Image (cartoon, helix red, strand yellow):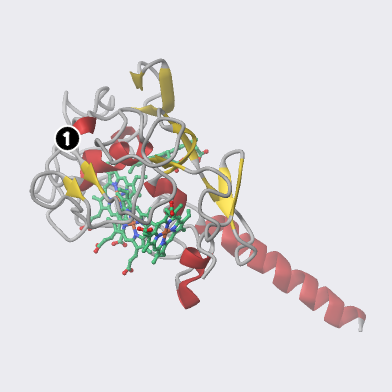
Amino acid sequence: MKKVLATIAVVSLMAAATTVSAMSIVGTKHDLSSTTGGGTYKGSTTQICVFCHTPHNAVGVNGSFYPLWNRSNPAASGFKLYSSGGMQNGYLTNGQGGASTGFTADSVSLYCMSCHDGATTLGAVKNPPLDSPASITTISGTNTITSSANLNDASNSLMNDHPVNFNLTNGADPAIGTVTTNTVGTASITNKLPLYKSQRGNTSLECASCHAVHDNAEGMFLRTTMNGSLLCLGCHIK
Ligand code: HEC
Ligand code: HEC
Ligand code: HEC
Ligand code: HEC
């Protein structure tokens, strides 16, 4: 009996260790380094974080420097976002309703679009890495995303994509799980999904509510599995 218990303990320890070690950006498609880069897009530096972050002199918007961003973002207001008559939460600052007038400049979703717009150069960083010349050139020969990971339809449209950069208010749509300080979720998921600060308010749904940029354990950098549509059921009571 003791042995069985010990085995169970070891197995669960191993499971925990697996989960922790899987949570790394190294070797994923978001690793654009020349050495460990996991996709077709690789830069001329061994550094990984530099494509998105810098320890000093970060890009900021209205006094907010989260998350120490190192990229040149496209114009925020140039984008059109999903909207519908049925949406109860909305794009107005700190409020409900309202049609989208584009991203707010501090939206972390806009930050994703600084690569996923298929137009901004992947190596367009403010502070270049010390091991490389003044700019990062891509080894693969393409400097922008040309695959289906380019979400930008003609004329900067994200209208056919799940809504992002809008503020959630508890109870505005009873078919959405409980919104607390900066998370949202239903009982179907263990870890509630994160909401972000933006000029819309403090509980803004962004790309990173569904995606974990540094962790590809679930595939597609998702926060939880799509088996049985668990991710969708994490917010939608359906
Ligand atoms: C492809 C772009 C990208 C790369 C590369 C990247 N990050 Fe991030 N990181 C982001 C984005 C976007 C956010 C904000 C959204 C979020 O919290 O998921 C973020 C948030 C963070 C945060 C604050 C939130 C948190 O998760 O703790 C830390 C710390 C961080 N990154 C560290 C790193 C380090 C260290 C590296 C390199 C090993 C790295 N990142 C590489 C895009 C990137
Ligand atoms: C520094 C540029 C950069 C930034 C910033 C960035 N990505 Fe990516 N992302 C890439 C590249 C390059 C790929 C690989 C595209 C390909 O292989 O066609 C990718 C792939 C992906 C994929 C598809 C993964 C797969 O397995 O096919 C997802 C999902 C994704 N990114 C989400 C995000 C989200 C969400 C953000 C913001 C929180 C973000 N990315 C920010 C460069 C970036
Ligand atoms: C409501 C959740 C949700 C939000 C919000 C969301 N995504 Fe996704 N995204 C997904 C899921 C789920 C998939 C995988 C779809 C599949 O496998 O068919 C995906 C796939 C992707 C892909 C791969 C597309 C492909 O065909 O290669 C990219 C790139 C991506 N997302 C980026 C983003 C960016 C950038 C944003 C914000 C503008 C965003 N996502 C917002 C859930 C979301
Ligand atoms: C992080 C929470 C979250 C996740 C995860 C999520 N959604 Fe949503 N979704 C929302 C919110 C909030 C709205 C806006 C609802 C409102 O205001 O009435 C929305 C809107 C929608 C709409 C448009 C509704 C309308 O009234 O126009 C559809 C359809 C939808 N989501 C489907 C999905 C699918 C499919 C998935 C899984 C791939 C998913 N969502 C994952 C939070 C989420």
Q: What residue is at 17 percent from the left and 26 percent from the top?
A: 133
Percent across and percent down for residue 221 are 40, 57
Q: How many residues crowd around disc 1 within 10 Å: few (fewer than 14), some, or many (20 or more)?
A: few
Percent across and percent down for residue 177 are 57, 57
Query: Which three-letter amino acid code belongs to the residue tagged 1?
Result: Gly
Q: For the N terminus, which image quadrant? A: bottom right
Q: What residue is at 39 percent from the left and 18 percent from the top?
A: 56
Q: What residue is at 65 percent from the left and 64 percent from the top?
A: 187
Say which element carries label 1.
helix
The tally of labels here is 1
* Quarter occupied by residue 29: bottom left
Q: What residue is at 28 percent from the left and 40 percent from the top?
A: 100
Q: Nearer the viewer, residue 221 or 205?
A: 205
Q: Nearer the viewer, residue 169 or 134?
A: 169
Q: Write down the residue under mark 1.
A: 78
Q: Is residue 83 left or right of residue 11?
A: left
Q: Tell me if I can see residue 154 in this picture.
A: yes
Q: Residue furthest right?
A: 1
Q: Tell me if I can see residue 124 in this picture.
A: no
Residue 122 against residue 59 in the figure, above or below: below
Q: Nearer the viewer, residue 42 or 194?
A: 194
Q: Residue furthest front?
A: 85
Q: Is mark 1 within 8 Å of ligand 3?
A: no
Residue 223 against residue 75 in the figure, above or below: below
Residue 116 against residue 137 in the figure, above or below: below
Percent across and percent down for residue 129 are 28, 27
Q: Is residue 59 left or right of residue 152?
A: right
Q: Is residue 114 left or right of residue 220?
A: left
Percent across and percent down for residue 64 are 42, 20
